[in-house]
Amino acid sequence: MGGVVDYLKDFRWLLDTLDVGLVAFIIYRIMLLIKGTRAVQMLFGLAVILSVYVGSQLTGLYTLHWILDNFLSSIILVIVVLFQEDIRRALIHVGANPFFADLSYREETAVMSELVKACVNMANKRIGALIVIERETGIKDFLEVGVEIDAKVASDLITSIFLPYSPIHDGALVIQQGRLKRAGCFLPLSQNPDISKTFGTRHRAAIGLTELVDAVAIVVSEETGKISVVVGGRITRDLDSTALTRVLKRLLEPRGSKKKAK
Ligand SMILES: Nc1ncnc2c1ncn2[C@@H]1O[C@H](COP(=O)(O)OP(=O)(O)OP(=O)(O)O)[C@@H](O)[C@H]1O
């Protein structure tokens, strides 16, 4: 063991590179995880307090410095309390793609085909729909109202949720970890002035949410019967069943997935 440590010491530069690389990667993953959540504002608030602390030390504002010194001495506790939800989420999600985290290859394929079937069916019947699929970044903070459901992804259930006389047909249906989790959720509308005037609020809601987080939104237009996929605020329109399957596979399959059909 000692021999290995001595040997590695000869490659200090390699260890330093690895060290810096790992820390950069961890910070990047943390940023990705909290991007678009309230944790970003809290982090910003903490950064402001830290700057005031350093400023008070440099300028000799002793009372302010003393107060902040006492506050910051329990910073670990403050961070754990403030970010408890994010920390819990991070630990659950380490090394996993939330959408398909616990699903086998066969289950993934079934979820995808049920989704496509539902969208094509609704498009043919001109039933308007908005389905949001959470990926790495949590979207909970952006969902207003809505009803919790927690059900298997099934084409008939999705269609019946969006039937005009269903009490939860308005708003978005949310899929998290391969399950239907909430329906009737209202999303932030995009404020982008460049969006075509032909898009109404359903499409604007899909664009608005995906501008903030990495979720994928599927929109079925009630007016035209066309299916669109929105990701990163960009919309791909007029998809048929084959194109929709291809796009969803590309966007939702865990990167570098090694799952094989069982
Ligand atoms: N903020 C929102 N979040 C989620 N869904 C919304 C939101 N605002 C409106 N919707 C949904 O969009 C529906 C209205 O769609 P509207 O006709 O305005 O949009 P559209 O983009 O033209 O869609 P379509 O092509 O289906 O008509 C509402 O009934 C509601 O279900």
Image: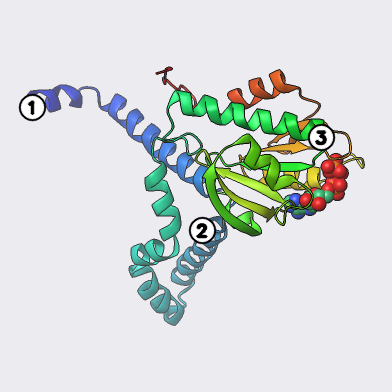
Q: Nearer the viewer, residue 112 or 19?
A: 112
Disc sitting over residue 43 in the figure: 2
> Residues at badges 1 and 2 in contact (C-beta under 8 Å)?
no
* Residue carrying label 3: 125
Vertical position of residue 143 compared to residue 219: above or below: below
Residue farthest along the bottom direction in this orientation: 63
**Mark 3 belongs to which amino acid?**
Lys
Above or below residue 234? Residue 140 is below
- Disc 1 from disc 2: Cα separation: 41 Å
User: Does residue 187 appear to the left or right of 85 in the view shown?
Assistant: right
- Label 2 secondary element: helix
Mark 2 is surrounded, within 10 Å at the Cα level, by few (under 14), some (14 to 19) or many (20 or more) other residues, namely: some
Spot occupied by residue 53 in the image (x, y as percentages of width and height)? 46, 68
Please state, as top left, top right, bottom left or bottom right, where the C terminus lies in the image: top left
* Disc ID at residue 1: 1
Q: Position of residue 25 (x, y in %)?
A: 43, 36
Which residue sits at x=56%, y=59%? 38
Residue 260, by quadrant, is: top left
> At which x and y percent is residue 182?
60, 51
**N-terminal-most mark, 2 or 3:** 2
Vertical order, 140 against 6 (above or below): below
* Camera-nearest residue between 129 and 43: 129
